[in-house]
Image (cartoon, rainbow, N blue to C red):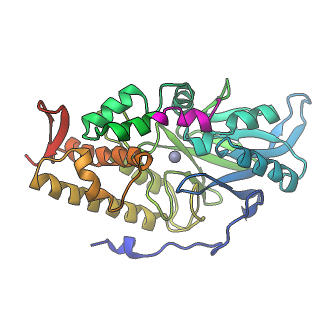
């Protein structure tokens, strides 16, 4: 049963409007919404172009007019072309002064290296995310690596043909993020970032990526939420092989609470996917309910018989999944089982017969 706040609906002040690729929509003075394509089921990402002004290092007392870019799109010809169109049609002949990236996922990070190089602009990003991106863009560290395949097998996904498909996508990250800038300016939790006339506060969030950074402008009630708060889909929350014991769902839910405590209910949320919306408390309540319901269903399944993450997939996902979707689905299933396990609601046992982790009600 959803709580009353979860039953309320969000408001979308721009209605059904979506900016075309290479075009921009001004959502607040000096804050422009760009929307670029993605070659996945999730077919677009929102990027933000913020009018900016910085001290000119070459002319003491002088200023440089330009833009701060928030997130970049993946590196492919279509996205590069869309950026060139933005440059021509939106940027009024002014340069990019800074490239700020919320987190290391390819749709956010992909073209950072290209934009930084093209404009000789610095990358601003959290250090944990930056290091993770540098590692992931090297070969053999990705989702299809041997440690990742062992991890999936240990959670019950051990069909050779599926794992062979996953292995073929080992360099998936590097295909979309071929390089990472060599230097960065580090974003830290609570740090103020001055962009144009506004001050944005960094709000770090865990659970979706190593240490996601969202931006809150208290003066104008604007929140660039990245992937931490989305209006119509729930953020992917996964356990990965690098941190096989982690509890990212608990971290994510704690981060949402922390965020909500800082934000105002009337603030305009600028998410990375979907449309800008109002109704932070409503959306947080909906997400809390969504995960609580899934945890209750999983707990019920673990009561009936010991469940591996692979056994849990039909409980969480009521549709057919291709091997690539399976990697995300497995990560999510493990995250939900780990939330129950770390909360002491289920036991975890490594079955000596087949080397698979199964979770059961004590
Ligand atoms: Zn993401």
Front residue of 21 and 280: 21
> What residue is rendered at 67% in x and 41% in y?
75
Percent x, y of residue 271: 57, 57
> What residue is rendered at 47% in x and 26% in y?
141
Percent x, y of residue 69: 72, 45
Q: Is residue 54 above or below residue 321?
A: above
Task: Give the total number of marks visible in the rendering.
Answer: 0
Identity of the residue furthest to the left in this view: 362
Quadrant in which the N terminus appears: bottom left
Question: Does the magenta segment cover residue 176?
Answer: yes
Q: Is residue 330 above or below residue 34?
A: above
Identity of the residue furthest to the front in this view: 161
Percent x, y of residue 145: 42, 28
Front residue of 105 and 256: 105
Does residue 242 appear anywhere in the picture?
no
Q: What's drawn in magenta, residue-wise?
A: 168-179
**Residue 78 horizontal side relative to residue 3, left or right:** right
Percent x, y of residue 158: 28, 38
> What residue is rendered at 40% in x and 35% in y?
164
Residue 193 found in image quarter: top right
**Residue 340 horizontal side relative to residue 264, left or right:** left
> What residue is rendered at 86% in x and 33% in y?
56
Question: Does the magenta segment cover residue 240?
Answer: no
Does residue 297 appear anywhere in the picture?
yes
């Amino acid at each position: 049963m959803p709580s009353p706040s979860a039953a309320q609906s969000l408001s979308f002040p721009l209605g059904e409007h979506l900016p075309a690729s290479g075009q921009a929509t001004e959502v607040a003075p000096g804050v422009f919404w760009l929307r670029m394509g993605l070659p996945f089921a999730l077919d677009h990402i929102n990027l933000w172009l913020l009018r900016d002004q910085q001290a000119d290092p070459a002319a003491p007392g002088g200023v440089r007019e330009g833009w701060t870019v928030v997130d970049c799109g993946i590196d492919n010809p279509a996205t590069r072309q869309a950026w060139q169109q933005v440059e021509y049609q939106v940027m009024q002949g002014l340069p990019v002064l800074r490239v700020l990236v919320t987190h290391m996922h390819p749709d956010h990070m992909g073209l950072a290296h290209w934009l930084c190089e093209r404009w000789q602009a610095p990358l601003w990003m959290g250090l944990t995310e930056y290091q993770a991106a540098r590692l992931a863009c090297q070969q053999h560290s990705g989702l299809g690596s041997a440690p990742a395949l062992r991890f999936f097998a240990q959670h019950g996904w051990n069909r050779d043909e599926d794992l062979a498909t996953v292995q073929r996508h080992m360099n998936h990250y590097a295909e979309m993020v071929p390089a990472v800038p060599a230097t960065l300016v580090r974003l830290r939790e609570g740090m103020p970032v001055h962009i144009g006339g506004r001050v944005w506060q960094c709000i770090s969030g865990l659970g979706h990526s190593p240490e996601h950074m969202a931006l809150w402008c208290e003066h104008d009630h604007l929140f660039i939420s990245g992937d931490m708060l989305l209006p119509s889909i729930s953020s992917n929350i996964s356990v990965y092989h690098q941190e096989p014991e982690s509890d990212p769902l608990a971290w994510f839910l704690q981060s949402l609470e922390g965020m909500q405590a800082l934000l105002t209910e009337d603030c305009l949320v600028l998410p990375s996917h979907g449309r800008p919306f109002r109704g932070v408390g409503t959306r947080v309540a909906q997400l809390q309910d969504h995960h609580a319901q899934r945890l209750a269903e999983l707990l019920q399944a673990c009561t009936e018989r010991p469940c591996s993450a692979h056994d849990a997939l039909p409980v969480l996902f009521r549709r057919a999944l291709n091997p690539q979707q399976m990697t995300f689905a497995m990560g999510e299933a493990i995250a939900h089982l780990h939330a129950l396990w770390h909360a002491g609601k289920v036991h975890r046992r490594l079955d000596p017969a087949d080397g698979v982790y199964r979770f059961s009600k004590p």
